[in-house]
Image: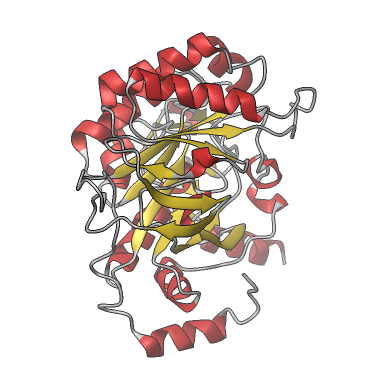
């Protein structure tokens, strides 16, 4: 019986990428800037990359712990196929240690501590089609740590004209960056703060690798990306820090990268801080606009700051209520009033081109128990 359990466990393992063997049976994982050196029988900081007999395996491959259909605005992405649905998925584990994590029930869990199910990569796009989604999002925990699974899902999704989205903390090495992001259509990157002190004490990581990753996205890929800054009272909401963050985006990424300031609510290990006030978000948004960023948003609250406005004539182009799009007058990627080009991805030209209805029906039977 014990041999059978070991065999079943081994069959579920998927050999990882981005690692090298070291003396004594250890392995060096260089997927993210942590560069974990993992002893046999142990896992890296992320919990789901494990050393078995001197080889690195991914416990997240084909094993999502969360499946959900969301509006694309929830990622948040405001300039990427607005008003559409996205098939969202995540696994256990994370390569950051954020005290304020709002998905801590899976991101701070090991693979055997969550209820995951086996979903092969080729089934994921069919599930997305079943639920009327135009894209697939890798989200909830940090998707970088299950990059092998993501790559194979993206390859399968491309056949059906589905777009792919990373919702990420940006903590990845250059060794793995292109392997993953060359398959990705859009991303939202959490820029959690703009001080090394915050990153070191509150996320247990470093700021500089995230800034480098954002520059790679801008200069070396065609990925549409937006940035989120969760504002936590007294920790990263100082107006001077907000100005520095906004100026860095303007100078290194340009004025057209959308920036989302979102409201914090107490969670996980950071329950002693109050919720972010609407006044704080309003002020942050105005600072970023004054710096010269064209598209700045407020999230996790009801606010006019959720709408998209033309940077030139100030016409309201996309109206939103929380994550719902209630109006969209952008025409051919431009303001209908002054014809100013609005940066973004406004339609999916491949939509429906290769959607195999029989395959969708077959997959629906396999996952009839899902209620998304």
Is 280 placed above or below 10 here?
Answer: above
Image-based side of 9 in relation to 335, left or right: right
Residue 231 in view (yes/no): no
**Residue 314 x, y percent position in the rendering:** 34, 38
Horizontal side, residue 254 vs residue 81: left or right: left
* Residue 77 location (% of width, % of height): 43, 47
Toward the viewer: 228 or 22? 228
Q: Quadrant of residue 45?
A: top right
Please tell me whether residue 215 is drawn above or below residue 75 in the rendered image: above
Q: Nearer the viewer, residue 122 or 188?
A: 188
Q: Is residue 302 left or right of residue 20?
A: right
Residue at 67% in and 63% down: 5
Give the residue displayed 62% in from the left and 57% down from the top: 65
Location of residue 311 with respect to 315 vertically, above or below: above
Picture residue at 29% right of the left edge, 72% below the top: 351
In-front residue for pair 130/276: 276
Q: Is residue 263 visible?
A: yes
* Quarter occupied by the C terminus: bottom right
Tell me where residue 343 sits by quadrant: top left
The location of residue 144, given as percent across then percent down, is 44, 42
For the N terminus, give its image quadrant: bottom right
């Amino acid at each position: 019986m014990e041999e059978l359990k070991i065999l079943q466990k081994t069959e579920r393992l998927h050999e990882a990428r981005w690692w090298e063997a070291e003396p004594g049976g250890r392995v060096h994982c260089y997927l993210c800037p942590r560069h974990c050196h993992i002893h046999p029988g142990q896992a890296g900081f992320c919990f789901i990359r494990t050393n078995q007999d001197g080889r690195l395996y991914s416990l997240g491959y084909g094993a999502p712990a969360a499946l959900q259909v969301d509006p694309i605005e929830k990622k948040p992405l405001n300039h990427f196929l607005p008003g559409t649905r996205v098939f969202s998925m995540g696994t256990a584990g994370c390569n950051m240690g954020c005290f304020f994590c709002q998905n801590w029930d899976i991101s701070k869990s090991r693979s055997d501590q969550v209820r995951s199910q086996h979903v092969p990569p080729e089934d994921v796009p069919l599930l997305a089609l079943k639920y009327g989604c135009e894209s697939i999002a890798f989200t909830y925990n940090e998707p970088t740590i299950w990059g092998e699974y993501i790559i194979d899902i993206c390859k399968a999704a491309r056949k059906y004209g589905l777009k792919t989205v990373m919702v990420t903390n940006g903590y990845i090495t250059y060794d793995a960056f292109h392997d993953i992001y060359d398959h990705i259509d859009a991303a939202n990157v959490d820029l959690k703060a703009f001080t090394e002190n915050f990153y070191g004490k509150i996320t247990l990581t470093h700021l500089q690798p995230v800034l480098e990753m954002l520059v790679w996205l801008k200069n070396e890929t065609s990925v549409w990306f937006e940035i989120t800054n969760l504002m936590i009272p007294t920790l990263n909401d100082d107006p001077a820090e907000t100005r520095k963050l906004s100026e860095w985006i303007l100078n290194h990424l340009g004025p057209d990268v959308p920036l989302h300031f979102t409201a914090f609510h107490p969670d996980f290990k950071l329950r002693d801080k109050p919720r972010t006030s609407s006044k704080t978000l309003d002020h942050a948004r105005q600072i970023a606009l004054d710096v010269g960023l064209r598209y700045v948003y407020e999230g996790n609250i009801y606010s006019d700051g959720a709408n998209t406005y033309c940077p030139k004539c100030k016409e309201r182009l996309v109206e939103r209520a929380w994550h719902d799009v209630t109006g969209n007058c952008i025409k051919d990627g431009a303001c209908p009033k002054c014809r100013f080009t609005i940066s973004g991805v406004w339609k999916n030209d491949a939509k429906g081109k290769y959607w195999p209805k029989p395959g969708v029906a077959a997959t629906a039977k396999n996952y009839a128990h899902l209620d998304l």
